[in-house]
């Protein structure tokens, strides 16, 4: 195979894949990566009980059959592609997955299901291998997201996540540079997904993640069988920066590869709702506690948010809305934060979403656009509350809870994991969940990560340690 033509973006990515080893990762990045991986598996466990998740799993079983790869939160083993798709959907479907805010990508929703499907298929993939691959993948996905100069029209988490997962799998597979270029071409030829799913609050949002996992795993099998794809897929005339991310510019970020580890910049979601809603939720809960008012005291709430937040969450609350709509509906989420003091999976029960008092409170909540010109900004978010007695309170959130500059505590991370494990379709027993979480936080010590995948299906510990 001849070397591909020069491409600044692709060649920088290939250099990064070649140069990155576990030993190059700072200790704090390894620790951060372990938390990111544990959080992603937690989301997959919780998502296994989502209303459509079993249908998605059944479809994968019908198409691809049983196999040896675990589907998290169930007691089933599917084919690598079937399990990868199911896990990808489960990670993303509750809007609970971690997120690189500046790049606006949920890259782990694609990367981890893909690399774990690979590891479970072939076995004897170490924790160090997974940590290294995940960091390469997140760096590539974030590079593409950070290069944007416009708001996304395509579904950036799926598209950027797929290219990041490709970089991660190229490292695990040990592909040479020309083969990796071909592999990226096979992935690029299958990229899909648009923001229309966001606009309509369609369950296809999670399915677009599943499609990306499937396409990356399919592309790798093709590359292993010497099938080829286009190689100039980043800088070519119909490549990524001329088709998907028009007017995007990767040049300012290429030098950061290998020096800035983007996994350590990832934000976590304390609530299963669109990230754009988290500032509003925190501020309202805090104001209620500080000012000692009740939902019944509220006359009006005005949410002043950046254009990106308004575009995603400015939709109205309706009596017939479904979970994907409610998870992205700022008036409903704000009303629920006031009534319940938090947002949880139970917030999206059908009778809760149709509750008249909740919907009446949501009618009092208005969403306005502030003057922030950043097309990807999630903050600042200003919340102004007016009570029926005329009192007024306001709060401005400049950094959302879960961001590295406003981190969740260790106990909050653990609580999210344990609650997700307990709520899975096949709930994990407490000792199994505890063992899994503890071992994920020291993933670098694992010689074969498929043992942890078995734990994530609820198999007993003895069986998982064989």
Image (cartoon, rainbow, N blue to C red):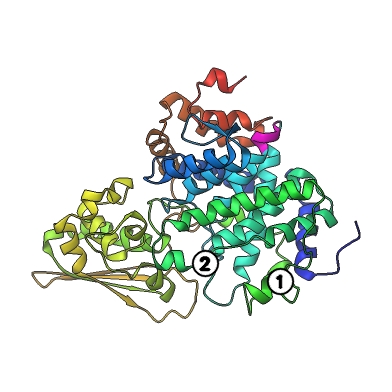
* On-image quarter of the N terminus: bottom right
Which quadrant would residue 427 be assigned to in this image? Answer: top left
Q: Earlier in the sequence, mark 1 or mark 2?
A: 2
Badge 2 density bin: few <14, some 14–19, many ≥20, Cα 10 Å:
some
Which residue occupies 77% across, 60% down?
A: 229
* Residue at which label 1 appears: 239
- Quadrant containing the C terminus is top right
In this rendered view, identify the residue nearer to me: 412 or 27: 412
Q: Secondary structure at mark 2?
A: loop
* Residue 22 falls within the magenta-colored stretch: no
Q: Position of residue 119 (x, y in %)?
A: 67, 37
Residue at 51% across, 27% down: 435
Q: Which residue is mark 2?
A: 194
Membership of 120 in magenta stretch: yes
Whole-number angstrom distance, CA of label 1 to CA of label 2: 17 Å
Residue interval drawn in magenta: 119-123
Q: Is residue 81 above or below residue 295?
A: above
The x, y position of residue 354, in whole percent, is 20, 55
**Which image quadrant for residue 406?**
bottom left
Q: Helix, strand or loop at disc 1?
A: loop
Residue in view at x 41 percent, y 43 percent: 412
Residue 449 against residue 198 in the figure, above or below:
above
Picture coordinates of residue 440, whole percent (x, y): 56, 35
Locate residue 445, reporting x and y percent: 66, 32
Dot 1, crowdedness within 10 Å: few (<14), some or many (≥20)?
some
**Left or right of residue 88: residue 293:** left
């Amino acid at each position: 195979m001849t070397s591909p033509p020069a491409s600044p973006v692709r060649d920088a990515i290939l250099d990064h894949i070649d140069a990155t080893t576990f030993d190059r990762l700072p200790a704090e990045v390894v620790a951060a990566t372990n938390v990111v991986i544990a959080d992603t598996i937690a989301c997959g466990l919780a998502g296994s009980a989502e209303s459509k998740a079993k249908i998605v799993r059944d479809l994968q079983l019908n198409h691809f059959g049983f196999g040896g790869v675990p589907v998290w939160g169930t007691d089933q083993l599917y084919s690598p592609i079937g399990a990868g798709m199911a896990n990808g959907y489960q990670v993303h479907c509750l809007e609970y997955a971690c997120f690189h805010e500046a790049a606006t990508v949920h890259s782990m929703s694609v990367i981890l299901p893909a690399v774990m499907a690979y590891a479970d298929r072939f076995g004897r993939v170490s924790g160090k291998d997974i940590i290294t691959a995940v960091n390469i993948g997140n760096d590539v996905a974030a590079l593409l997201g950070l290069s944007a100069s416009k708001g996304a029209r395509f579904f950036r988490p799926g598209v950027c996540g797929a290219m990041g997962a490709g970089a991660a799998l190229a490292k695990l597979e040990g592909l040479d540079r020309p083969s990796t270029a071909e592999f990226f071409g096979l992935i690029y030829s299958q990229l899909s997904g648009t923001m229309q799913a966001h606009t309509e609050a369609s369950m296809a949002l999670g399915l677009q993640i599943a499609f990306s996992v499937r396409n990356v795993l399919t592309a790798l099998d093709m590359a292993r069988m010497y099938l080829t794809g286009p190689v100039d897929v980043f800088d070519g005339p119909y490549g990524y920066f001329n088709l998907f991310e028009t007017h995007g510019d990767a040049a300012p970020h290429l030098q950061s590869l290998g020096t800035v580890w983007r996994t350590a910049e990832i934000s976590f979601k304390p609530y299963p709702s669109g990230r754009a809603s988290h500032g509003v939720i925190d501020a309202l809960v805090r104001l209620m506690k500080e000012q000692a008012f009740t939902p019944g005291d509220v006359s009006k709430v005005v949410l002043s948010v950046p254009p990106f937040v308004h575009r995603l969450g400015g939709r109205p609350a309706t009596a017939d809305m479904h979970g994907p709509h409610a998870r992205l509906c700022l008036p409903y989420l704000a009303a629920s934060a006031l009534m319940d003091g938090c947002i949880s999976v139970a917030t999206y029960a059908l009778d809760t979403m149709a509750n008249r008092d909740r919907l009446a409170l949501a009618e009092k909540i208005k969403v306005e656009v502030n003057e922030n010109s950043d097309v990807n900004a999630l903050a600042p978010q200003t919340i102004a509350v007016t009570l029926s007695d005329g009192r007024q309170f306001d709060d401005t959130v400049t950094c959302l809870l879960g961001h590295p500059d406003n981190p969740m505590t260790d106990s909050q991370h653990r609580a999210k994991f344990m609650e997700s494990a307990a709520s899975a379709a096949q709930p994990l027993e407490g000792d199994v969940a505890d063992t899994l979480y503890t071992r994920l936080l020291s993933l670098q010590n694992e010689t074969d990560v498929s043992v942890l995948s078995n734990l994530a299906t609820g198999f007993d510990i003895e069986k998982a340690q064989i």
